[in-house]
Structures are given as C-alpha cells and as structure tokens.
Image (cartoon, rainbow, N blue to C red):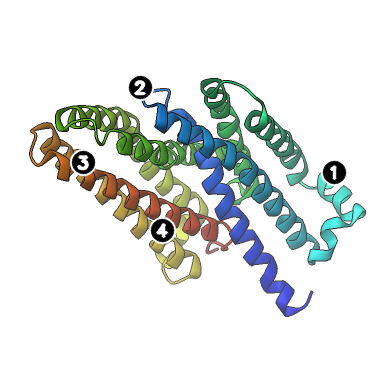
Amino acid sequence: MDGSEGLAIPALLLLTRWIHFASVFALFGSALFWTFTPGAFPGARRATDRLLRVAAPVAVLSGLGWIAAIIANMADGLEKIADLQTLSLFFHQTQFGPVVEIRLALFALALGLAAWPMAAEARRRAMIPVGAALLIDQAWLGHAAEGSGAWGTLMLGVYCAHVLAAAAWLGGLPPLLFALRETRGQGEDETRRRTVDLLLRFSAIALPAVGLIVASGLGNVSFRVGASVGCMFMTDYGSVFCAKAALVSAMLALAYYNRFVALPRLRLGLASTRQSIALQTSVAFELVLGLAVLAAAALLGVTAPPQ
C-alpha cells in the first residue's frame, strides 16, 4: 500500500463514519420526535418525512462506504474491497462479519421503508426501531467492542446508551426547527403558546438524554483509557476528545439558554416575536454544533486511545 492510499483509507473511514452517524441519528431521533409531540404541524411532519426518505439512502450508501473502508484497512489496500477471497475471510473469519450481515439486512429494511408507499406516520414509527438497531449494531464496529467478558458487555451497554441518548437529542433538532418555523405567522399569542408547548415537550426528552450523554460519555472514556486518563491529554486521542467536549459544552450552553432563559421570557410574553426568532436561530446553531460533534466523534473512533 503506497503513501497516498495509506492516507485515503483513514479519510474514507472518517468521512463515511461522519455522514453515517448524521443520517442514522436523523432516522432515529427525527422519527422519535413526533411520538412525544402531538398537534397539527402538517408542514413540519411532511418535512420530517422528506428528511427520513433522504436520510435512509444516505445512511445506506455511507454505511456501505464505512464497511468498504474497514475491509480496505484490514486488507491493506483499496483494491482488496472487491476481492472475493478477502470478502470471504472478512465475513466468515472476523468478528465484524456477523455484525455487518445484520447491518446489511437493516440497510435493506431502511431502504424499503423509505421507498414503500405507506402513510408518513407509519413510516416514522417504523424508522424508530430500525434507527435504534443501526445505532446499537455499530457498537461492534468500533472501540466499544474491544473489551471481553462482563467488562466488555458493560462497555457495549454504555456505548449503546450514549448513542441512543445523543440521537434522541440531536436527531430531534431538525423536526423541532421545522415545527418552530411553522408556528410563525399565526398571531403573536398563538405563536408563543405553540412555541412554549414544543420546547417543553422536547425538553422532557432532551434533558434526561443530556444527563445520560454526559454520564455515558465519561464512562466511555474511562473504559478506553483506564489508568492512562492523566496522560490522555498529551495524545492525539486526548486532543480530539477535548475538541469534542468543547463542542458538546457549547451545545449544552445553547440548550440551557433555550430552556431556562429564552423559554421563560417567552412564557411571560416578553418580546414574543423576537424571542421566538431567537429560539429558532439558537436551535439552528445547536444543530450545526451537533454536526461538528459527530465529526469529532467520527475522528475519535478512528484515533487510537492511549495504552
């Protein structure tokens, strides 16, 4: 494998992981959002359905690219991706083979749900378990699968809790933004009422999710670095972790502002229109930061933790 190919494989791993994380988060979190957000938001529901129908093929294509990058990395060459012997060894003699087979079946199911002419609500409900299964299944494709015995099972459990909670929060931001935009132009009192109701319902899921994200994130780091936690910050892994932590902190600051500053002001009717626009802008920034967090998570997954 030459130098350019040696750089291409990690780049492919990073890019496909990032896109895949974002699309699967959307499949799970955006569909889940409407299970606890009743009410007439026809435009937002249609926008969410379009998002799901786009996210499914993107998740499949990026997921296939991720699998191809794993095979190329293990076989030391991009040309080995299409080699039948290499593929046979990968699927039958590595720990990744059974995991990837399950993943391929889930990809087919996600594509079927996206393409099938079914009611939008039924599609959203069906996407929740498919998205959850994809999030859980990917635990066996990264560092979380490196443990063994009871300790390894605990690592996998903490990882699954982490990604499900993160997807519920971050994946719920697009439909929240769609719905917030739909509340505009309905009169100041009605806009305020519906915006407050939306944020309270989202907070009921997001606040517990944030607590679980922080706790499980710390657990993930302690599992991976163990006694090396003090030395971690002098490594590439530590630098990426710090960048991710800074981005998550910025997201938490925005979420705190939305829930405990802007929302109370809106409930009191203080500059309702301006507060509503500010909330939408804040949620949009929160979503952008979330995509940056996923990029950091993708990089963290391909960076070796300190020994």
Tell me which label, 1 or 4, sits earlier in the chain: 1
Instruction: State the separation of the CA atoms marked 2 and 1.
Output: 50 Å
Tell me which label, 4 or 3, sits earlier in the chain: 4
Tell me which amino acid carries mark 4: Lys
User: Tag 4: Cα neighbours inside 10 Å, few (<14), some, or many (≥20)?
Assistant: many
135 or 38, nearer to the observer: 38
On the image, numbered disc 1 is attached to which residue? 92
Instruction: State the separation of the CA atoms marked 1 and 4.
Output: 35 Å
Which one is closest to the eye, mark 1 or mark 3? 3
Disc sitting over residue 40 in the figure: 2
Residue drawn where x is 51% and y is 41% of the image: 25
Tell me which amino acid carries mark 3: Ser
Residue drawn where x is 35% and y is 30% of the image: 205
Which one is closest to the eye, mark 2 or mark 1? 2
Whether tag 4 and tag 3 are in contact, CB under 8 A, the answer is no
Instruction: State the separation of the CA atoms marked 1 and 3.
Output: 55 Å
Tell me which amino acid carries mark 1: His
On the image, numbered disc 3 is attached to which residue? 276
- Give the side of residue 107 with respect to residue 288, left or right: right
On the image, numbered disc 4 is attached to which residue? 244
Image location (x, y in percent) of residue 28: 51, 34
